[in-house]
Amino acid sequence: MKCIIIAAIIAALITLMFIYNSQVYPMKIGLRKSYALNATQPQQKRIPKIIAWTGYFSSSLSERIRSYPCPYRCDVFDRTELPEEDADAIVFHFRNLWDPNMTLPKTRRPDQIYVSFLKEAPPHAGSAVNDPRFAINFFNSTVDYRINNFTYFDQSYFAPVATEDDREKMRPLSEEGFIEIIKKKTKPVLAIISNCDDKSGRLKYISELSKLINVTKTGWCYGRRISAERQEELIKSHFFVIAFENIACKDYATEKFWRIEKDIVPIVLRRWILKPKAPDGAYVAADDFESPRGMAEHLINAIENQDAYRKYFAYRNTHYKVTVDGFCDLCRDVYFNNVSATSHLDMKEYYSVSRECEFGTGNKLLSNTHHGERATEEISFEERFI
């Protein structure tokens, strides 16, 4: 009798765990909705099958899908390893669909879902955006960096601490730890720009800012290739780092912003880019200021005032980083039949540049500078910051 009671308790706990995962994981910032699991429904005995139809640029897409640990079981195949009609989901790397003569699946089950995978911003989605084969009746969902109900979110974000388990995932910062950080910092602003593609107008804004405050410019675009080791040294020695992308798109943040994990404060072009991925107080946004002069004054004040600079690290004691594997969430939903093959995406509309992105952001911010105040006017800061 005691064994039966214990077994019943364990079964109830497992059921609650699955319900929690389906309703909460990884929902903390309004990610793609999960359907509540039917607690009385037995688990599928068959392991779902996913085909990686394309490569991932020149690498293996199936290896990318399998690259992160996942508590849900799905078998992943290259397209030569499994008949297409046997797959529950087929994943395509959107950039690899550039060839109009590429062979596509010929047989599609009514319950089979097609998923687009893309980590690039819409302007770099590739020529497949205009391919009529990928119009409304092809893709059912995506795996990318965006936050919406069609997407399996595949990136990181900061979530507020809500439980003791969350607290264990924080990187808390003590006063002693903060002092150790700033002891190594001797220079104001760092800009590492490797790609000279400048749809965002970032280079012009950086140029104007550097006339007001010292900006260490490095990277291929400035004719200075640097090693990973040298990059780490520069990050440790600077207070702020430019995190301007070559295009300003909603939700789009790359490693430039995630240098925040290396104890440096990022500067982004627009605050709306990172909402709701990071707390407002963790970074600087250029559009918070009327001109580069206003930003320069703010940065100098933070550098000279430890209390002001410390505020940028307050999130370390209130938030923790969550890294979401979109393919794991896809596997979960396929496993529990929480997918729909009846909804379809218009890929040209989904990757719409005009709706998701802003061109020339840096130039627009400079044009907002008051006519009576030149952005290039020198500010009489201490010599070490000029």
Image (cartoon, rainbow, N blue to C red):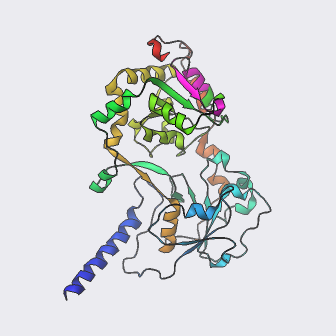
Residue that appears at 53% across and 52% down: 146
Q: Is residue 195 magenta?
A: no
Nearer-the-camera pick, 149 or 78: 78
Q: Residue furthest top?
A: 380
Q: Return the x and y of residue 294 as percentages of the image width and height.
A: 47, 21
Q: Return the x and y of residue 386 as percentages of the image width and height.
A: 50, 15
Residue 152 seen in this snapshot: yes
Residue that appears at 63% across and 48% down: 122
Q: Is residue 121 left or right of residue 232?
A: right
Q: Tell me where residue 230 sits by quadrant.
A: top right
Residue 291 seen in this snapshot: no
Nearer-the-camera pick, 372 or 229: 229
Tell me where the magenta segment starts and ends, as one range.
204-221
Q: Return the x and y of residue 189 as percentages of the image width and height.
A: 49, 26
Residue that appears at 54% across and 61% down: 67
Q: Residue furthest bottom?
A: 1
